[in-house]
Image (tube, coloured by chain):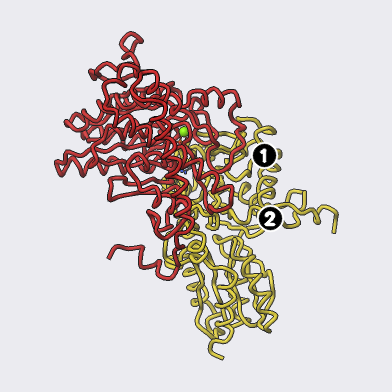
C-alpha cells in the first residue's frame, strides 16, 4: 500500500476532490448552483473552489432550480460537462421538467443525435432536524426515469471514484450524497480514479442472510452486522453503489448463497427502490434458493417530522436493522 | 417611469395607480389611535425577543433543527398585518416568526413548536420553518423558496370565487422572486384580479447572494410591470410607511381591483440560518443597517412626536420580554410527541 491510499479524508472532501481534479483535467467541466461561491455551498462541499477556478466555472445562480437544470442541459448539449448542484435533494422537484422530460429523453427522442453529459449532485436524507421539505430521499423517481443513471455512494472512497465516473459519463447522472455521510472518513487515494457504474460491493461476507443497501444505510447495516456476529448470525452486506445500472449479478449470487435477503433503505417503503430489488430477486434464479420471504426495512410512509425522536423513528436505525435481520435469520428455520 | 412621477415616500413605483400621498411618519403617527401604535410596538418587540430567545435556546443545544431569524426586519410584517382585518389571511415563508407573531399567534404554542413539542402549533412535526396557525388565518410557512407564492394565488382564487370580503397578504424574500413560481403566480393573480397583496421582504440577500447579483433590476417592484400589476418599493424599516402603503394595496385588493406588489426594503442582521460566517458581506454594512433598527426608530418616533411617554414605551418592551421568557420556560416543560401512530396523520379521514 502506498502512503496515498492511507490518507483519510471525509466524504465531503472526496466529493470536492473529484470535482476539482476533473475540473483541472478538463476545461469543459464546470460547477453550477446556488451559494456555491464564497459560501462554499450549503454544506461546504465547494469551499475553496471559487478561489481556484473563478466565477466562470464555479457559476453561482439566482435561486432558480429549473433554470439551473436547464442551463446544465443546454451546456451539456453543446459538449460541456456541467455539474449542477441542487442544495437539497428535495428541491430537485423544482427542476423535474428539465431533468425528467428534457435531459433524460433528449438522446433517445432525437434518434441518438445528441448526448447530455451532465451530473446532478444533491444531498439527501434525514437526521438534521430539517423537517419534511429538506430531508427526502427521492432516488426512486429518478431510477424510474429511463435516460438517467443514479448512483448513491456510502463512503468517501466510492464517492470520489463514482463522481469521477459520473462526470465522464456521457449521460445525465444523478449523484446522490447523504448529509450524514459528509463528515465520515475513509482512506482515499490522492490520484484520480474512476469506479465503474453497475458494480455492487460485498462489504462484509456472511452466510446467514444478505443485507442489500446503499448510502447511509450501509454503515448502519455494517454496524448491525457486527453486533449480530457476536450472536453468531453472519450477515452478508452488499453495497449497491449504483442503483441504475444495477448489478443484478452480485445480488443474485449473494442471495442464492444465503437464502435470505433483507433490503434496507431510508426512503419510504411504498414505491421505494426496495420494491424493485425484491422484484429483481423474485424473478431471478435466486428465488429457488430463498428459505424465507424477501423482507424490506425502509422509511415509514410519512413525511419526515421535525422533532428529533419522531425523525429518528421515521427511518431505519442500527437497532431496527439488527432486529429485522435477527428475525429474518430465524424465519422458516 | 421617470423620477418625477415617483410618489414621495416611495423608492420606486410602477403601474397606473393613483396612490394617496405617503405621509411622513412624524405626521402620520398623530393620525393613528395610540392603541394601534402600542400594538405595533408590542408585536415588534415580541418578534425581536422571540428570536433572541430562539438564538439562546439554540446555543444551549435545545433546538434540533435550523431557524431563520428576521432580527432587523420586524417592521414589514407588523406594519402590513396592522392594516389587515382579523378575518384576513397571510401566507409567508421560512423567515416567518414576525409574520406569525403579528398575526396573533399564541407565543407559548409557537415556542413549543420551535422546540418540537407536542402542544406546539404543528405538534412538533413542523418546527421553526413551518409554523402555522390556520384557525387564525395564518396559512403557514414553506421551506421551499418561492413555494408559497402560487399557493397564495390559489387562496386568492378561492376568496374571489366565494365572493369573500377577505383578502390575503403573501410574503416572500427577494431571492424567491427568481423562482419560476413567482412569475407564474403573479401573472395569474394579476390576470384574474385576485384579492392579494404580494409583499417582498427584501433583506438584500438570498442566503449568500446579494440580490443585485441575482437580478438586473434595482427594485423588485419593477418586476410588477411585466404582470400589469402596480408595484411599489418603500422603506421597509419604517413601520408606519409600511402600514400606509399596504393599507392602500389592501384597499385595492378588497375592492376587486386586483393585486399589488409591495417591496419592503430592509436588511437581515443575523446570518442566513443557524450559522453563517458572513463571508459575503462586510461588517460595516451590517453595522450601518443595525443603526437603522426599525424598533429603535419607532420608539424614537413615538417619543419625539409625544404620542407616548418613555415609561409607557419601556413598559411595553419589558412586558414583551417577560412574555417571551415565560413562554420559553413553559415550552421547555411541554411534553415531547411520540412516534407510534404517525402513519394515521398523513391522510385526512
Ligand atoms: C427551492 C429552494 N431552493 C433553495 C433553498 C435554500 N434556501 C433557503 S432560504 C434561501 C434564500 C432565500 O432568499 P430570500 O428569498 O431572499 O429569503 P431570505 O432567506 O433572505 O429571507 C435559500 C437559497 C430552498 N429552501 N428552496
Ligand atoms: Mg433575502
The residue at the point 54 percent across, 72 percent down is A263
The residue at the point 44 percent across, 47 percent down is B129
Residue reaching furthest left? B163
Percent across and percent down for residue A35 are 56, 37
Q: Which chain is yellow?
A: A
Instruction: Please give left or right for residue B241 compared with residue B62 in the image.
Output: left
- Any mark on residue A156, and which? 2
Residue A146 shows in this picture: no
Is there one chain holding both mark 2 and mark 1? yes
> Residue B122 is drawn in which quadrant?
bottom left
Secondary structure, mark 1, is: helix
Which chain is disc 1 placed on? A
Q: Quadrant of the C terminus of chain A?
A: bottom right
Q: Which residue is tagged 1? A: A23
CA separation, marks 2 and 1?
Answer: 19 Å
Instruction: Please give left or right for residue A79 compared with residue B71 in the image.
Output: right
Q: Which chain is red?
A: B
Badge 2 residue CB within 8 Å of ligand 1: no
Percent across and percent down for residue A194 are 69, 53
Badge 1 residue CB within 8 Å of ligand 1: no
Residue reaching furthest bottom? A333
- Any mark on residue A150, and which? none
Sequence-wise, the earlier of marks 2 and 1 is: 1
Residues B163 and B124: in front is B124
Residues B231 and B274: in front is B274
Percent across and percent down for residue B62 are 55, 53
Number of residues whose C-alpha sits closer than 10 Å to that of mark 1, classed few (under 14), some (14–19) or many (20 or more): some
Amino acid at each position: 500500500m502506498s502512503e496515498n491510499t492511507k490518507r483519510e479524508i471525509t466524504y465531503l472532501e472526496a466529493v470536492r476532490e473529484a470535482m476539482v481534479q476533473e475540473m483541472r483535467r478538463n476545461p469543459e467541466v464546470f460547477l453550477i448552483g446556488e451559494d456555491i461561491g464564497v459560501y462554499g455551498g450549503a454544506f461546504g462541499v465547494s469551499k475553496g473552489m471559487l478561489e481556484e477556478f473563478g466565477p466562470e466555472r464555479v457559476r453561482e445562480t439566482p435561486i432558480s432550480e429549473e433554470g439551473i437544470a436547464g442551463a446544465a442541459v443546454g451546456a451539456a448539449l453543446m459538449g460541456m460537462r456541467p455539474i449542477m448542484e441542487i442544495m437539497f435533494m428535495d428541491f430537485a422537484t423544482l427542476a423535474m421538467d428539465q431533468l425528467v422530460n428534457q435531459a433524460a429523453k433528449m438522446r433517445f427522442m432525437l434518434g441518438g443525435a445528441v448526448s447530455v453529459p451532465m451530473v446532478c449532485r444533491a444531498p439527501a436524507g434525514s437526521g438534521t432536524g430539517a423537517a419534511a421539505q429538506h430531508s427526502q430521499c427521492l432516488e426512486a423517481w429518478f431510477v424510474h426515469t429511463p435516460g438517467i443513471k443514479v448512483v448513491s455512494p456510502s463512503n468517501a472512497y466510492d464517492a470520489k471514484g463514482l463522481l469521477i465516473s459520473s462526470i465522464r459519463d456521457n449521460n445525465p447522472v444523478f449523484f446522490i450524497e447523504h448529509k450524514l455521510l459528509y463528515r465520515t472518513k475513509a482512506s482515499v487515494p490522492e490520484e484520480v480514479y474512476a469506479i465503474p457504474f453497475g458494480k455492487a460491493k460485498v462489504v462484509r461476507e456472511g452466510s446467514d442472510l444478505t443485507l442489500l443497501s446503499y448510502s447511509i444505510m450501509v454503515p448502519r447495516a455494517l454496524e448491525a452486522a457486527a453486533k449480530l456476529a457476536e450472536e453468531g448470525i453472519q450477515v452478508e452486506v452488499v453495497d449497491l453503489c449504483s442503483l441504475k445500472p444495477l448489478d443484478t449479478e452480485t445480488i443474485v449470487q449473494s442471495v442464492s448463497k444465503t437464502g435470505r435477503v433483507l433490503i434496507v433503505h431510508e426512503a419510504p417503503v411504498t414505491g421505494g427502490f426496495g420494491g424493485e430489488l425484491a422484484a429483481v430477486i423474485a424473478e431471478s434464479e435466486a428465488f429457488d434458493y430463498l428459505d424465507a420471504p424477501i423482507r424490506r426495512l425502509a422509511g415509514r410512509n410519512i413525511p419526515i417530522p421535525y422533532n428529533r425522536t419522531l425523525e429518528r423513528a421515521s427511518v431505519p436505525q442500527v437497532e431496527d436493522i439488527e432486529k429485522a435481520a435477527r428475525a429474518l435469520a430465524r424465519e422458516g428455520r | 417611469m421617470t423620477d418625477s412621477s415617483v410618489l414621495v415616500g416611495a423608492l420606486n413605483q410602477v403601474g397606473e395607480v393613483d396612490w394617496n400621498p405617503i405621509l411622513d411618519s412624524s405626521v402620520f403617527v398623530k393620525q393613528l389611535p395610540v392603541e394601534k401604535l402600542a400594538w405595533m410596538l408590542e408585536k415588534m418587540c415580541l418578534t425581536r425577543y422571540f428570536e433572541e430567545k430562539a438564538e439562546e435556546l439554540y446555543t444551549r443545544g435545545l433546538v434540533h433543527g435550523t431557524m431563520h431569524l428576521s432580527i432587523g426586519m420586524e417592521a414589514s410584517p407588523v406594519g402590513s398585518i396592522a392594516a389587515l382585518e382579523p378575518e384576513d389571511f397571510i401566507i409567508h415563508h421560512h423567515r416567518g416568526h414576525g409574520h406569525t407573531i403579528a398575526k396573533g399567534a399564541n407565543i407559548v404554542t409557537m415556542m413549543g413548536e420551535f422546540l418540537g413539542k407536542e402542544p406546539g402549533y404543528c405538534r412538533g412535526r413542523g418546527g421553526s420553518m413551518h409554523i402555522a396557525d390556520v384557525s387564525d388565518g395564518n396559512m403557514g410557512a414553506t421551506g421551499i423558496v418561492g413555494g408559497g407564492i402560487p399557493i397564495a394565488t390559489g387562496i386568492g382564487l378561492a376568496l374571489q370565487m366565494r365572493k369573500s370580503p377577505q383578502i390575503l397578504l403573501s410574503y416572500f424574500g427577494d431571492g424567491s422572486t427568481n423562482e419560476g413560481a413567482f412569475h407564474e403566480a403573479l401573472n395569474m393573480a394579476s390576470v384574474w384580479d385576485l384579492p392579494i397583496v404580494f409583499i417582498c421582504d427584501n433583506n438584500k440577500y438570498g442566503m449568500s447572494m446579494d440580490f443585485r447579483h441575482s437580478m438586473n433590476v434595482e427594485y423588485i417592484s419593477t418586476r410588477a410591470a411585466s404582470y400589469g400589476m402596480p408595484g411599489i418599493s418603500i422603506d421597509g424599516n419604517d413601520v408606519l410607511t409600511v402600514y400606509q402603503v399596504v393599507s392602500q394595496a389592501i384597499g385595492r385588493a378588497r375592492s376587486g381591483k386586483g393585486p399589488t406588489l409591495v417591496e419592503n426594503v430592509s436588511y437581515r442582521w443575523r446570518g442566513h440560518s443557524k450559522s453563517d460566517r458572513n463571508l459575503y458581506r462586510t461588517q460595516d454594512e451590517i453595522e450601518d443597517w443595525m443603526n437603522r433598527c426599525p424598533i429603535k426608530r419607532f420608539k424614537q418616533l413615538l417619543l419625539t412626536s409625544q404620542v407616548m411617554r418613555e415609561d409607557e414605551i419601556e413598559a411595553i418592551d419589558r412586558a414583551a420580554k417577560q412574555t417571551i421568557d415565560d413562554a420559553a420556560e413553559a415550552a421547555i416543560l411541554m411534553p415531547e410527541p411520540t412516534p407510534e401512530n404517525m402513519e394515521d396523520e398523513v391522510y385526512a379521514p
